[in-house]
Amino acid sequence: MSINAFVSQGHGIQTDGTYDCGCTYGDYTESDLMCPITKAFVARVRALGLSCDSDSDTGNDRNITLCVRDANNAEATIYVSLHCDYDQAPSGTYPIVYPDSSEGIRLAQCLDNAIRARINIGTRGILQRADYEVSNTNMPACIFETGSISTDLSILRDQGWAYGDAAGYGIADYFSIAYGDIPVAPSSPGVDNPVPTTGTQADICLEYGDTGIVVGQLQRDLRAMAYEDESGNTIIVDDDFGPATEYAVRRLQSVHGL
Ligand SMILES: [Zn+2]
């Protein structure tokens, strides 16, 4: 069997051309933090002699939907998407696989073992949940939440290259490929330690009537935390701070005593 891994840098340019940066913490974004991790992962998989496709080769120009499409079209043998969890999430790795997918679970376990043998991070265990990337891929798939963007920031930011390199070994383990002869890590091209690129987002104060991508990120965060509008509907990400968003923010503030 020929092996062709598809490794997705979580988030990126959406089908409508807009950019989805994933979750944020202060000035850090999920997509930026996943850049060195994904590049190192891909470099390690290739150094192990395996074929690998990735949107990290082309500037993270594809989001989740397009990566799934391309992996299916390429008949990839496995699919891994690299993410980090939002700022309220506990510390630790959190791989997500399709419910009862024994190969998905085995892939998640191989990745998690390879990472935690080399990086000092705990795990929250494997989550079986029918998220888009594991539901719509035609091959064993894992959404790998590498850690919490807040609690695990120092690992994700300062050890990103080592983290991705470690994860790459998990692919060899999954396919039972020996790698004793390849001890040298592919060197980092200097993409480690991503610097914040989003300005002073932590200090931005949003209010009713505001519009733009920062409002969109707030709406994504509210969705991720399951805050709903007054009628119990999921918040729609439309970059527009309207009544539904305001209601959800007030709920969040009251829950947290703000
Ligand atoms: Zn994500």
Image (cartoon, rainbow, N blue to C red):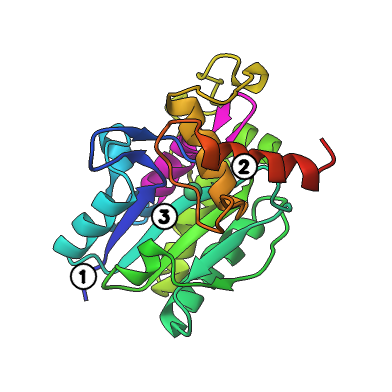
Q: Which residues are magenta?
A: 23-44
Is 244 on the left-hand or right-hand side of 240?
A: right
Magenta residue check for 28? yes
User: Residue 173 versus residue 65: which sits nearer the camera?
Assistant: 65
Compared with residue 105, is residue 132 higher up or lower down, i.e. above or below?
Answer: above
Mark 3 element type: strand
Asked if marks 1 and 2 touch (Cβ < 8 Å), the reply is no
Q: CA distance from mark 1 to mark 2?
A: 52 Å
Magenta residue check for 99? no
| Location of residue 222 in the rendering, given as x and y in whole percent from the top left corner | 58, 45
Q: Give the labeled residue for mark 1.
A: 2
Mark 3 neighbour class, 10 Å CA radius: few under 14, some 14 to 19, many 20 or more: many
Q: Residue furthest right?
A: 257
Amino acid type assigned to the residue bearing label 2 in the image = Tyr
Q: Which mark is residue 81?
A: 3
Where, by quadrant of the figure, is residue 62 drawn?
top left
- The numbered mark, 3 or 2, whose residue comes first in the sequence reads 3
Q: CA distance from mark 3 to mark 2?
A: 33 Å
Amino acid type assigned to the residue bearing label 3 in the image = Ser
Mark 1 element type: loop
| Location of residue 245 in the rendering, given as x and y in whole percent from the top left corner | 55, 39
Q: Give the labeled residue for mark 2.
A: 247
Amino acid type assigned to the residue bearing label 1 in the image = Ser
- The structure residue drawn at horizontal position 29% and vertical position 68%, both measured from the top left corner, is 137
Q: Quadrant of the C terminus?
A: top right
Asked if marks 3 and 2 touch (Cβ < 8 Å), the reply is no
